[in-house]
Amino acid sequence: MKTKLLFAAAAFVAAAFPLSAGAQNQPYDKWCRDQGLDHGSVQICWAYTYEQCMASRVGRETCYLNPKYDPRWRRNR
């Protein structure tokens, strides 16, 4: 019974606080990867951190900073 109660409490805490404090300040699409398709690839930008992006890779995909947030790609206005 204690194990079930402990597991339920841990699940509640994990659901209530899903992100670390550092990740909360970052956009959800900060890191991208290119997923290969039969004819080309598609850009998937759906990771708060580099580590999350690397964990979601399939095969030899690489992760990179979303060009939207990368200062090297910003235009001077």
Image (spheres, rainbow, N blue to C red):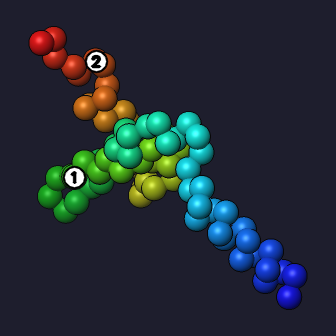
Q: Is residue 41 visible?
A: yes
Answer with left or right where residue 76 lies relative to residue 53.
Answer: left
Question: Which one is nearer the viewer's eye here, 18 or 38?
Answer: 18
Residue drawn at (31%, 35%) of the image: 66
Residue drawn at (56%, 36%) of the image: 22
**Residue 36 occupies which quadrant of the picture?**
bottom left
Pointer 2 residue: 72
Pointer 2 local density, CA inside 10 Å: few below 14, some 14–19, many at least 20: few
Q: Can residue 62 be seen in this view?
A: no
Type of amino acid at the residue the image marks with label 1: Val
Badge number at residue 42: 1
Of the numbered discs 1 and 2, the one sitting upstream in the chain is 1
**Label 1 with label 2: CB-CB less than 8 Å:** no
Image quarter where the N terminus lies is bottom right
- In this rendering, the label closer to the viewer, 1 or 2: 2
Question: Which one is nearer the viewer's eye here, 74 or 14?
Answer: 14
Residue drawn at (38%, 46%) of the image: 28
Type of amino acid at the residue the image marks with label 2: Arg
